[in-house]
Amino acid sequence: MQAVPLVLAGFGNVGRAFVRLTSEKKTMCRERYGLDLHLKAVLKTAGGFFGRTLPEWDEIVELPAAETTRHPAWQSGLGLADVFSRLEPGVLVEATPTDIQTGEPGLGHMIAALEKRWHVAAASKGALVLHFTELTALARKNGVGLKYGGATAAALPTLDVGLFALAGTEISRIEGILNGVTNHILTRMEGGVSFSDALRETQEKGIAEPDPSLDVDGWDTACKILLIANSVAGTSFRLSDVRRESIRSVTQDDMRKAGEKGRALKLLGRFAKENGASWAEAKLVSIDKTHPLFGVSGTNKGITFFTDTMGPITVMGGRSDPRGTAAAILKDIINIYRP
Ligand SMILES: NC(=O)c1ccc[n+]([C@@H]2O[C@H](COP(=O)([O-])OP(=O)(O)OC[C@H]3O[C@@H](n4cnc5c(N)ncnc54)[C@H](OP(=O)(O)O)[C@@H]3O)[C@@H](O)[C@H]2O)c1
């Protein structure tokens, strides 16, 4: 049995879903994978919890956010350095907010973990998008895993397909509906709803953030196609290399005209290698019924890899919520330890 110490940075929607899932799947991980998962620490901005056992995590995870810091076990000022100095290496689960300007706080967390020979399983994107080459090189140098399925469309398997199922192929093109929020808005607009009403509805349902700009302005899709292309096609895109389009400009008239021609407007993350050059973009594209992603509607996602020897391979589905993201993190942890 392999003991797996876990440290979780970020105790919001994803962090809490991960704690619940770990508790739920602990026995299965022991029996099926020989992994004994031990959540050792949970960190928020101003401190955290350290050394609790699982039944107590079950209690802590159900506390309302405002009461977390009043729990008797809360340690104000507790940080990653304290925790790492007192534990054998395991996996850092990075679930702090995504900041695509600085990459922090995820960047500092990931560097600290990789330098101490902890594996990393990330849901946050900022650090990876801004410092992909440096972080992957650091992980390689220290012989540890750096996984980020939670940051590349979460429950929809993108990297696993590109890296493992398509090994030995040449991937010349990738097209993906990688963001559930924008796909849901566009689907509602196909039904005649205006952009602002569709956005409001999506926010009221808790699908979109109060500040939806990361999603609707294409940043999230751009980040994901960058990470997917850099991982499976060996490119070194920076965010400024990825052309990006917002869906704010789409009108009901655009949707109606596309519908009349039997087409649909989708925000696609696209990558292509053409004549020795590569490009990536997050772009509104009109697709017809023959496109493999035509039927991907609502919060669903999908990705098609165009390969030389296996033809086009499409994967669709995957929950677009914190539980689906937590499941992607757990999958990454299991695969880190897979012999
Ligand atoms: N929500 C989803 O379905 C989803 C899907 C895929 C990927 N993601 C990514 O997953 C990450 C987490 O998302 P979320 O929805 O769980 O966000 P969230 O609800 O805002 O939670 C973020 C958590 O990070 C903590 N935090 C902030 N700064 C920190 C620091 N310096 N050290 C330790 N903890 C810190 C916050 O603690 P305080 O409360 O103390 O500020 C909070 O607990 C984001 O990067 C997001 O892009 C989310």
Image: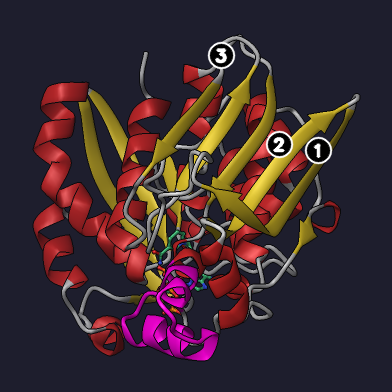
User: Which SS class for mark 2?
Assistant: helix
- Residue 204 in the figure: left or right of residue 303: left
Q: Which residue is mark 2?
A: 230
Percent from the top left, x then y, of residue 57? 18, 62
Nearer to me, 276 or 119: 276
Of badges 1 and 3, the one in the foreground is 3
Q: Specify whether tag 3 is near ligand 1 (CB below 8 Å).
A: no
- Which amino acid type is marked by label 1? Ser
Percent from the top left, x then y, of residue 198? 44, 83
- Which amino acid type is marked by label 2? Asn
- The secondary structure that dominates the magenta segment is helix
- 176 versus 202 height, above or below: above
Q: Which residue is mark 1?
A: 236
| Mark 2 nearby-residue class (10 Å; few <14, some 14–19, many ≥20) | some
Name which of mark 2 and mark 3 comes first in the sequence.
3
Q: CA distance from mark 2 to mark 3?
A: 15 Å
